[in-house]
Amino acid sequence: MKAGSNLEKMLTAGHFAVTGELGPPQGNDAEEVRHKASYLKGIVESVNITDNQTAVVRMASWAACKILIDEGLEPNYQMVCRDRNRLALMADILGATALGIKNVLCLSGDHQRFGDHPEGKNVYDLDSVQLLATFKKMRDEKKFLNDKDLEGAPELFIGAASNPFADPFEYRVHRLAKKIAAGADFIQTQCIYNMDKFREFMKQTVDMGLHEKCYILAGITPMKSVGMANYMAKFVPGMDVPAEIVQRLKGVDKKDQGAEGIKIAIEQIEEMKEMEGVAGVHVMAIEWEHRAKEVIEGAGLLPRPTLD
Amino acid sequence: MIIGDSKPLEEILEMIEGRDKVLVLGCRGCVTVCNVGGEKEVGILASALRIARKKEGQPPSVEEMTIERQCDPEYIEELAEVAEEYDAIVSIACGVGPQFVSERYPLVAVFPGINTTFMGGATEHGVWVERCQSCGNCLVHNFGGLCPIARCSKSLMNGPCGGSASGNCEISKDVPCVWHQIVDKMAAMGRLQELETVWPNKNWLTSRDGGPRTRVREDLKQ
């Protein structure tokens, strides 16, 4: 065991893992974090806490992680390279692990031009691959990047993201391989809607044997409406929403579109459960945490297996 | 070369407001080549200032001068006789120019007439693109001759990120994803496997992050 987190234990035991996601508020309301977390308790192994996602300022990820720990949930601390340099990234992971955080997801981060402070200066001292290598070094060699010894090294289950739908497609699996080589123990993918392309990506992944080197969790985000599907297709970087999905949502009454979106997500998970190389699903019910249970339960993934 | 953009006329007028005798100072270096600060542009800006100031009832006296390079004390010296006669010198060289002029003539008010934007080159007539960030440790040969530090919006050394779409960067459809270009170029050269290298964290000491930089060549110093 690297960190002994629920997520690591579940994956190591060979169970099909389920993770969730929670976006901290644009303010300091701890109650809102607790409220959202209450919907995810007991239905996922760990909950990703986003880090200024889409470059919009929110409550610090580590702080929201701590609120979850206090509520009896396990967080997965997302960290982006956009907002802090190597000093801050290493300091934050030491602080986070001291607070009991065991999972981390290393990301480049959306460019700040998308967000609510586009005039800001970005950092990108490290990139996501270098961040993975940094945390692996801190955990395994018990050293800082400068090779000085740590007085107390972090125990971490280290994650990375992969977007099978970004370009160039043929190179995506190679970048995944780089992330695994750099130190990723697990991967959570971008939201998947184009199943044909994802099948092809997983085939390449399995052909290269990458699924044996790390755990791959497929990203699932239920569509709430046709509006959301159109927005994601047009405005979210690296998102591939096939026309069939939009058509299918359009085919039902507006009030039933959410239910249809959940149905699509359940069908996707059913297929993921059988797909070679997929070790679990990452259910990102964006600002829809209270519906996550319907997706997970509908896919026959509840109750979650108990761990020794 | 260094690329710049002219400041808006209104901004320059505001800077020099109330100053009687004005000199527009051009440079025959990079800014002449990128058509923003050479003799021709000195003439255009000086005329525009004269007309505007006359209209506002301000003294229209605006003189013109262009020197070989504003980043070289030897040429800045050419102003020695006249600099202090002016109430304002508007330098339309890159950001180095107004500073060298200010340092040499500390009592004269010097104003920047252009914004220095980046280091790059012209891809076609009238189009300039950024190519270098002067990080102080060139690595472009490892990336098919393309620089991920200057040309990737996130300066990723292990790209492309998940925002790369149809050859473009996530920040804009008008910005090419250099990492897409790097992958294509390395593939075309049969060197794609070289990109499997996990590039370690970069040493930014040689970059601006290490503090303002000075270069001393003992073999050339007099």
Image (spheres, rainbow, N blue to C red):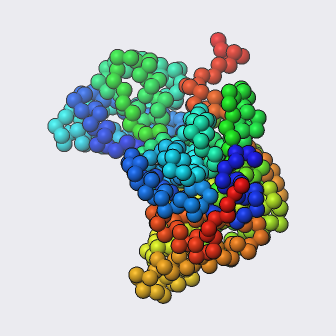
What residue sits 72% from the left and 38% below the top? Answer: A139
Q: Position of residue A219 (x, y in %)?
A: 62, 65
Is the C terminus of chain A in the top left, top right, bottom left or bottom right quadrant?
Answer: bottom right
State the residue lying farthest toward the left. B57
What residue sits 55% from the left and 53% below the top? Answer: A73
Viewer-nearest residue: B159 or B46: B159
Viewer-nearest residue: A185 or A171: A185
The answer to whether residue A82 is visible is yes
State the residue lying farthest toward the top. B222
Image quadrant assignment for residue A102 = top right
Q: Is residue B183 above or below residue A149?
A: below
Left or right of residue B94: residue B120: right
Q: Position of residue B55 (x, y in %)?
A: 19, 42
Q: Position of residue B152 (x, y in %)?
A: 60, 50
Q: Is residue A105 above or below residue A298?
A: above
Viewer-nearest residue: A84 or B151: A84
Q: How many marks can you see?
A: 0
Image quadrant assignment for residue B48 = top left
What residue sits 78% from the left and 49% below the top? Answer: A181
The answer to whether residue A78 is visible is no
Q: Position of residue A228 (x, y in %)?
A: 46, 71
Image quadrant assignment for residue A256 = bottom left
State the residue lying farthest toward the front. A308
What residue sits 49% from the left and 29% below the top? Answer: B96
